[in-house]
Amino acid sequence: MKQYTGRTLDEVLNSIAADQGCQVQDITYNVLEEEKGGIFGLHKSITIEAFTSKDVKEFIFDYLGAYFTELNQGVAIEIIVEKDKDKEEELLYRVILDAENNAIIIGKNGQTLRAISTVLKAAVNATFKKRINLIVDVNHYKEDRYKKVKAIARREAINVAKTHIDCELDPMPNDERKVIHQYLQDFKNVTTVSIGEGNKRHLCIKYSPEKKEEAED
């Protein structure tokens, strides 16, 4: 993250906002040092480290650009910044890739795409010292994948409700588990829970007789 110094916090934040062309409330920052000195504190100063969505986007572009250059892959990168549906105070960075050969970027069962996403998230979080919400997609692969996992979850949830026998799904990444959690939250007589660690973490659809909400259509 970049560091900024000024006489007051407001002065620094307003300077960043003017430079980045954003609102002060769009700036994420941490105070590193605050000094007070001189008569009436006239020589005081404050130093912060801060970033905006523009900084995050630039980092993602640069990081992925270097990443795919190393792999000798031509990839177009688009980044859409939107409000997170679950946490409106948080931003979601939707990274959309379009390669010369998208199948290579996706990999078998999406494994390569998941690896790219994991590496990128780790780099972004480490750089900005904050958990940044982002999703990496290739030519709407994720959208199609979400539809498939929801169809699987619906079928298994109906079976669990009928048989009262819990069902464990195959391991899947956090974003896909989240989609199923949300999709099944209003289904009658079933609940979902994530179990396992690392790349073996998966969902269990459990029979819940006390849950009486109506299922979705």
Image (spheres, rainbow, N blue to C red):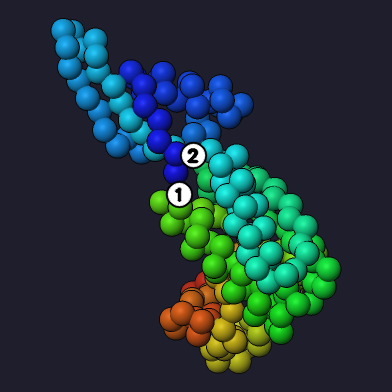
Mark sitting on residue 51: 2
- Tags 1 and 2 touching, CB below 8 Å: yes
Q: Is residue 110 left or right of residue 101?
A: left
The N terminus, quarter of image: top left
Q: Position of residue 71 (x, y in %)?
A: 68, 71
Residue found 53% across the figure and 38% down from its top: 52
Residue 184 makes an appearance in the image: no
Residue found 53% across the figure and 61% down from its top: 121
Whole-angstrom CA distance, mark 1 to mark 2, is 7 Å
Asked if residue 49 is positioned above or below residue 165 in the image, the reply reads: above
Asked if residue 163 is positioned above or below residue 134 in the image, the reply reads: below
Query: Residue 46: which quarter of the image?
Result: top left
> Can you identify the residue that label 1 sits on?
128
The amino acid at mark 1 is Phe
Q: Residues within 10 Å of mark 2 (few under 14, many from 20)?
A: some
Q: Nearer the viewer, residue 143 or 29?
A: 29
The C terminus, quarter of image: bottom right
The amino acid at mark 2 is Phe
Mark sitting on residue 78: none
Ranked by sequence position, the earlier of labels 1 and 2 is: 2
Q: Position of residue 26 (x, y in %)?
A: 53, 33
Q: Residues within 10 Å of mark 1 (few under 14, many from 20)?
A: many
Q: Nearer the viewer, residue 98 or 145?
A: 98
Classify mark 2: helix, strand or loop: strand
